[in-house]
Image (spheres, grey):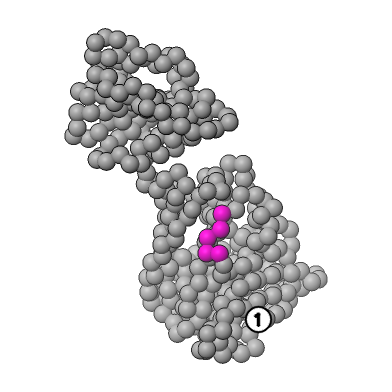
Amino acid sequence: MKKLLLFALPLLFCFTLSAQITQEEADDIVREHLIAATGDFTVYAKEDVQTNFVVLTATNEKLKLNYPCWVYYVNFTDETNSKYLIVKESNGNVLEVNAWNDEGPDGLEDWRAVVIYPMEVPFTEYSLSETMCVWKQFIYPIITIINSMEELETHISCAVDSFPEIDFSQNSLVLLRESWANPFDFGTITFTQFSKNRFKLNVEMLVYNHTTCTDDQVFSFITKKLNDESIIERHWQRIFTSTQLKNINFPSESELVVVNSMEEFEYYFEYPEGNTPEIDFSQHTLLMPNGYRNNIEHVYDCQFIKQGENEYKLAVKLIGGQPAFSQWILKLLISKLPPNTVISLNVSN
């Protein structure tokens, strides 16, 4: 270890955790500890739990840490000061050691770089398109965090079989509900973490060039485990495109359009050249219930029900009441339906 001038002895940042601190938890503790730090800095982590870590002071006195801990080194850009953060494995307490004129620990090139807030959180889209299931509610709340299969079951309606399981011991499922007065597609979506429990979803809505036609959609994704205190803010950006929805009659009694090929898809949708989505209609069917009402309506609830051999009912409940005409549409991508399938549409308020 290179020589450093020891400036500060234990500064404890307390956490009460029942189990030993994992490396991922230690990373989060360090991020929280540095959330108010100013200036540019880089954080490095020594891999694996350390049981005998020694800091040598400028007077050649050794500060020996003889308890299991996670060790971090914080290097401030263009400054002479740096610091070590020692996270105790047993309870998450932090020992902070500030240093000046320090060249850093030996072998720093082998330490792991730690991403500090704000940080992009990876996620995987969770889709019902391989199933005979649909999302139930489409309006409220805008963002829902789900942490159990029992809770997830209350949000999904399945005509046949079930939906993909999620390991909720390690993950959470986030539901994002968006609604707008024109048809739209989801564009780029990013998930950013700003503190231990504060997150933001940045959402692009690619809006069609169409007259008033309310569209309601759900985007769902699997991400790391979120606790009950987690708060997700949503920031949306509407991008108006030249995409067209066409050849839909929007009857007052409502109708169900069933799409089973790209030829049929392109009959109803016109995208800018090169932007048409790729849908494998050998594996999928697109259901598009739609209609016309005297009041602006949004889809509130949806149920997909099996009634017999190749017979199904799609029940859609609308909510609204603003005094203006309203065309509405719902786009549901599900598993491929046989050619002789019969689906009845039931629309209610």
Which residue corresponds to the image point at 18% horizontal and 34% vertical from the top-left? 78
Is any part of residue 188 visible from this angle? no
Does residue 222 sit above or below 213 in this rendering? above
Foreground residue among 228 and 319: 228
Which residue corresponds to the image point at 69% horizontal and 53% vertical from the top-left? 150
Location of the C terminus (image quadrant): bottom right
- Circle 1 SS class: loop
What's the magenta bit mostly, secondary-structure-wise? strand
Indicate the position of residue 238 as horizontal and vertical percent values. 39, 70
Which residue corresponds to the image point at 56% horizontal and 77% vertical from the top-left? 298
User: Magenta includes 77?
Assistant: no
Foreground residue among 255 and 152: 152
Q: Disc 1 residue type?
A: Asn
Does residue 6 sit above or below 21 in this rendering? above
Does residue 248 sit above or below 127 in this rendering? below
Indicate the position of residue 316 as horizontal and vertical percent values. 66, 76
Residue underneath mark 1: 349
Name the outermost residue toward the right: 308
Q: Quadrant of residue 106?
A: top left
User: Magenta includes 142?
Assistant: yes
Residue 15 relative to residue 129: left or right? left
Indicate the position of residue 203 as horizontal and vertical percent values. 43, 62
Indicate the position of residue 59 as horizontal and vertical percent values. 24, 10
| Magenta stretch, residue numbers | 141-145
Q: Quadrant of residue 102?
A: top left
Does residue 76 sit above or below 218 in this rendering? above
